[in-house]
Amino acid sequence: MCVPKHPAAPAVLCALAATTILLASAGCTSNEPRTSADRGDGGRAKGGIAVSSTDDTCSVSTTRAASGTLVFDVTNDGSKVTEFYLYRADGKTIAGEVENIGPGLTRQLVVRAQPGTYTTACKPGMSGDGIRAKFTVTGSGRAVAGADQRLLDQAAARYRSYVTSEVDKLLSGTKQFVAAYKAGQYDRARELYAPVRVHWERIEPVAESFGDLDPKMDLREADLAQGQTWTGWHLLEKDLWWPADAPGAQRLTDAERTKYADQLLADTRDLRKRVATLEYQPDQLANGAKELLDEVATGKVTGEEEIWSHTDLYDFQANVDGAREAFDALRPVVDKKDPALGKVIEQRFTVLRKQLGEYRRGDGFVSYTDLSQAQVKQLSDSVNALAEPLSRLTATILV
């Protein structure tokens, strides 16, 4: 049973989110051109590493693999929606993840891994540190063919430029937002909030890869663990759109506003510094595109991401923009290996962006609360339709 994380999140939206999870995982029927995934194998790469996730176990069929393209077939044998992660040596940086695996379903994580020590983790209920185990990648894997590798390197370079540009805009906008907020110019801060956050949302998988930094900057109140200190964008969002019915709660003091705003700016500078050192792999682009659609399904469609400001459509559009940029960077490889898949993804991006355009007002969007249940369901259905072919992207370019 899906339960809204906050009383302001309508139950119907939670039901829609549950539907999104199931449909995105199970796929859908279409009259679109047939792709490799329609030829009897479900679009899955062969010879995957089997993972069984239950409510209290995470069984991985092997703890070692050769470097190169790794394929994890993750089956949810439990009763809770689960996630599967592959972490790098520090146990915090995410090498790859697959989310929203409903009970009884199997989803695939395809990553390119260099030799080294990693950690696997299943997260029943999609919370906490997960059930973890060590995983070793040896140095005897197969390399990608030369011509394909050149295209993949070009894709990674293009995406790196995109992320650098977006994080620069995020830092510049955050400086303006923090200055207005600390000066008590709350109307101006509210105007800046959503337009600045789009730069975060477009590169959210990159930001989330820093497991220690993302919770400090983007954690929602509903996701706080017991005893955890709440910081970041959504704390300031609540203060700016303070709920009139907040029971027994007190607004931030001026000293607290200064403290948390300064921390947000410092964390954004830290993000910019870390991003500057990143080297992007093709699987990160492809998996990131799908992760952005997962973000829409689990946060934006339900209205829970921006529970106070109701600016979810800004985030929705930004996630779609980021996914599209990753896909466009990889398009030359997709067109070479499976052009029919590229056409399907292109068509479904066009449909979704057209629907989002209906809710634009000037440079922004209407409040998410203005949408009817039918309009929310239409957006949810379009997310499902796009998420299904995007889930095949990584296997297509690497396997």
Image (spheres, grey):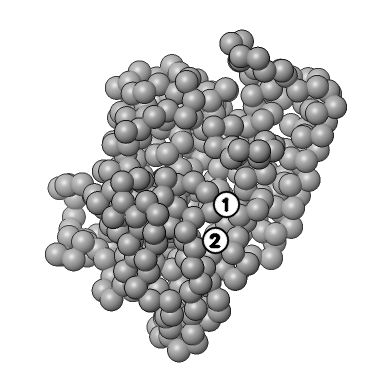
Q: How many marks?
A: 2
Q: Is residue 118 left or right of residue 341?
A: right
Residue drawn 24% across the image and 60% down it: 340
Residue 350, image x and y in percent?
35, 42
Question: Viewer-proximal residue, 328 or 122?
Answer: 122
In the rendered image, the vertical position of residue 218 relative to residue 145, given as above or below: above
* N-terminal-most mark, 2 or 1: 2
Q: Is residue 105 left or right of residue 362?
A: left
Question: Viewer-proximal residue, 381 or 83?
Answer: 83
Q: For the residues marked 2 and 1, what is the alpha-carbon distance in whole angstroms? A: 8 Å
Disc 1 residue crowd, few under 14, some 14–19, many 20+, Cα 10 Å: some
Q: Secondary structure at mark 1?
A: helix
Amino acid type assigned to the residue bearing label 2 in the image? Ile
Check disc 1 and report the residue beneath it: 208
Amino acid type assigned to the residue bearing label 1 in the image? Glu
Check disc 2 and report the residue beneath it: 94
Residue 7, image x and y in percent?
47, 20
Q: Quadrant of the C terminus?
A: bottom left
